[in-house]
Amino acid sequence: MKNKPLDLGTAPTHDEYFQENFSDPVAAASLVRLAAPPDVLDTLDLNNMTALPTSQFDPDMGKRIPDLLFECPSTAGRIVVNILFEHKSSPDYHIALKLLRYVLLDYEFRLQHKIKPAALVLPILVYHGKTNWKPNFALIQEAHVPKSLRPYILKIPTITLNLRNITDSTIENIEQLDSHTRATLLAMKHIFSSKPEHKAFMKKLVAKVKAMPIDRRARFVERTSLYLIQMGNVQADIAETLLDAHPDEEIPMRFKSGLQLDRDEARAEGIEQGIEQGLERGMEKGIALKELHDIEIIEGMLGHGLDWMLIQKITHLNQADYEALRLKHGK
């Protein structure tokens, strides 16, 4: 019996993709090593990070919470560090206010629940949008404030990781990254890249995926293929090459069949919509022609001296309807 195509489902959003791939403390620690400066790394025990729930930030307001939160012991001093990840795929010009809110809520939560020792909140912003963005972590633009008052502008100290500014060779070769992190960062970095870059990027991505542990490879391949095709600019036939790294030889064929089925359905839906739109335009055009024809007939009758009582009996249009049609068609 021939296997059915896989039900592909919906691609992960940018936030979901980030959360799925960095919710594990090992992957998150790898990301911190790429983002943080050496002096900060010296004070963090990244091998003992613990994931924390983010629901504490806003249990009543749904998704207005940071993407990921981890507790990390410090290598010096009686303090722990709460590493807060905020991910953006497009510029957010209210980022300072959001981060301030997260930081305050974290301190308030620990104070309310008498959690010790004290925790320093370290925000890390990860960005990979289509356009260049230099985030402003001050609550107000300096240009709007007199110089004498600028020292009092509240700023949120934040580490920024802009994937647009990191080369592929850095992602591929830096020692502190594991293969899963390398593959995820390559996918995020290139999801909005131009078509000429896609083949070269996919070749690198496939190599990194094949170096991943086999138990993590299947889900990553399937989710990333959908992510690149549905959420980015990567063409389906190029993204499908990632399926070559799938550990199950049968799945890629069924997966490609599912992708083809989706494309066929989308094409058929597009044709059906085109026919419907064409019929609508045809009907509109037919109505317009009929109305113009009515105007010409009435003008001819008026030219031969017929009165409106007789014209109305013949055409079923009174003088007011005739004037409205003339106005509609600019006559």
Image (cartoon, rainbow, N blue to C red):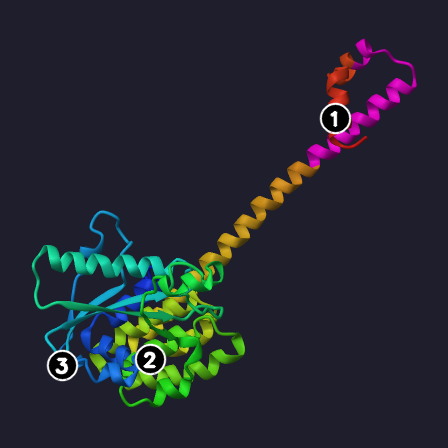
Where is residue 184? Give x, y as percent.
33, 76
Quadrant housing residue 108: bottom left
Inspect this view and state whether residue 20 appears. Answer: yes
Name the disc covering residue 76, or none: 3
As helix, strand or loop, the secondary structure at mark 2 comes to helix
Name the disc covering residue 325, or none: 1
Amino acid type, mark 2: Ala
Q: Identify the mark nearer the N-term, 1 or 3.
A: 3
Amino acid type, mark 3: Ala
Magenta region: 286-311
Q: In this view, does 119 lie above or below 201?
A: above
Locate the N terminus and report the quarter of the image it occupies: bottom left
Identified at 77% across, 13% down, the residue is 312
Where is residue 269? Give x, y as percent.
49, 52
Quadrant housing residue 240: bottom left
Question: Mark 1 and 2 residues: CB-CB less than 8 Å, in contact?
Answer: no
Q: Distance between the residues labelled 2 and 3?
A: 33 Å
Where is residue 242? Give x, y as percent.
37, 78
Q: Is 52 within the magenta?
A: no
Q: Given this view, does label 1 or label 3 mark the residue nearer the observer?
A: 3
Nearer the observer, 19 or 216: 19
Residue underneath mark 2: 183
Q: Identify the mark nearer the N-term, 1 or 2.
A: 2
Where is residue 284? Give x, y as percent.
66, 37
As helix, strand or loop, the secondary structure at mark 1 comes to helix
Magenta stretch, main secondary structure, is: helix
Q: How far apart are marks 1 and 2 (CA)?
A: 64 Å
Locate the C terminus and report the quarter of the image it occupies: top right
